[in-house]
Amino acid sequence: MSELLTLSEYQAIAENIDFPRTPFIDGKFRAGSGSMLKTINPATNQLICEINACNADDVDFAVVKAREAFEQGRWSKIHPSDRKDVLIRLCKLLTRNRRELAVMESLDSGKPIRDCETIDLPETINTIKWHAEAIDKIYDHTAPSGDDAIAMIIREPVGVVAAVLPWNFPLLMMAWKIGPALAAGNSVIVKPAEQTSLTALRVAELAMKAGLPRGVLQVLPGDGPSTGAPLGLHNDVDMVSFTGSTDTGRKFLRYAADSNLKKIVLECGGKNPAIVLNDAEELDLIAGHIVNAAFWNMGENCSANSRLIVHRNVKQALMERVAARTRDWKTGDPLNPSHHLGALIDADHCNKVSGYLKYGAINATTIAGGKADGNFIEPTIFDDVKPDSPLAREEIFGPILSVLTVSSFDEAMELANQTEYGLTASVFSANAKKAIRAARSLRVGTVTINSYGEGDISTPFGGYKQSGFGGRDNGIFAHDQYTELKTIWIDLSDAAPRESVGWTPLLTSRFSVSAGAVDIKEEP
């Protein structure tokens, strides 16, 4: 982990960054055909730079180059160990440039530099390195096909993959996608969020320096209609991996239906509960987890525990500790390493979150915070929240914690599942049996017990219901979504094919089914 610098040192780095300003296509920066995209620092509302965005023509050109690279085998057909070596070199370049990348990420997104330095950059590098190291260690399979045949089940890269990124974790979500996608041998086109394009462009440049062939990793800045939709509708894009809102995720499903039925993997929203049962112990520790879960990254986190479901027997003691911990989370200049909270992504989003502040001030009890200043919002806690309130049901994506009180285990489970989402949950209990029973009852993709988190790079991440679709990020499971399974059947039998009714010569099966019969008869 890097030691944090001072505010003045981070400011000096910021003043000397040469920001990328054009798309990265076919191995180099080149002018796009779209309009100029203003990149704004959300903490100051000042212009960082203007980026030449892409449109459908650029998407067409990039897809052609990605397909060309794939079919020529520049990356897809080289030895897995060679792919690993290139990605390891990329990790070394990311490490060498980590300070600049961290500052660029903070300026672009409003994220606190302490998080960029200690979480986002280390995890980005670790993710790519983990998938790189897995490349030459994933084995294919043979099937138990008997003595007369050999059945091989192999993985092949999907082809051209579009990775559509969110603005809340620009670097880390890029790594979650390009790590396994490139490891599998695909050509990848990254479409960053229009608010946060800078670090994706820099990573593509570093990947070329690491030895990634041209056309294998391209970055197309732009908005949804001009760049995202053409990628989703393109008949030569084989897959889209998307992280973002559920509403936008639905669009990519429609795009697939209206084009080539490309594979779609969605990681979408969440309204995640932290459930504190009546036998919970170490309330100081629990309070720390709850505050971190609710306010980390300004609550702009799909896995944020934005609902606290607490048993009335422990509520008062816990809430005193949660309120005290919240006071330690200072909001301000993201480049100041003493600040835990930076700015929300932009004025539009801040106005949306401020609407919930106004609603909560009238319809709930304010325990902490409640104020907005520019694009900064204080960490806020609302108590006495009703289960059918927007505070309890809607994804706010801001630093707001809603507290709901329950009287039993069953009531807590029912309330926790009372949402259209199913991404994550946290359960706090001193009774291991009860905690595991709770974890099994929750309709979510990840449950943490007596802690908050998402697992680690080795564990799959994704959701139930409207939180996810089509696959999982992280772990070996992530490789599955970027590959196609192929069966290769080798017939070793010397016998001639049988032609009887119901017989399947290809499978050389020992069984046949008579037409219209319900029983299965073994062949003599």
Image (cartoon, rainbow, N blue to C red):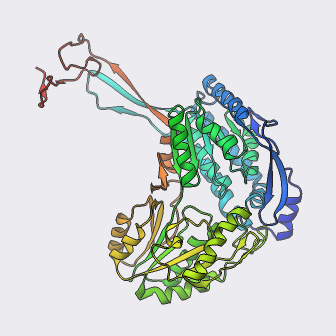
Q: In this view, does 236 lie to the left or right of 336?
A: left
495 in relation to 123, above or below: above
Q: Specify whether 392 is left or right of 442.
A: right
Q: Give the x, y percent position of residue 272.
A: 49, 66
**Can residue 521 be seen at all in this image of the molecule?**
yes
Q: Nearer the viewer, residue 217 or 323?
A: 323
Looking at this view, name the residue that lies furthest to the top.
Answer: 496
Give 49 or 154, whichever is nearer the viewer.
49
Q: Nearer the viewer, residue 314 or 52?
A: 52
User: Residue at 74% across / 65% down in the picture?
Assistant: 113
Q: Is 475 above or below relative to 424?
A: above
Residue 449 left/right relative to 188: left
Residue at image coords 58%, 76%: 291
**At x 63% / y 64%, what residue is drawn?**
300
Residue 137 drawn at (x, y percent): 50, 40
Image spot of residue 473 (x, y percent): 52, 50
- Would residue 20 be visible to someone looking at this image? no
Residue 358 quadrant: bottom right
* Residue 116 falls left or right of residue 401: right
Q: In which quarter of the image is the C terminus?
A: top left
- Placement of the N terminus among the 4 image quadrants: bottom right
How many marks the image carries: the answer is 0
Coordinates of residue 118 in the picture (x, y in percent): 68, 64
Relative vertical location of residue 319 with respect to residue 215 in this rendering, above or below: below
**In-front residue for pair 454/86:** 454
Q: In which quarter of the image is residue 486?
A: top left
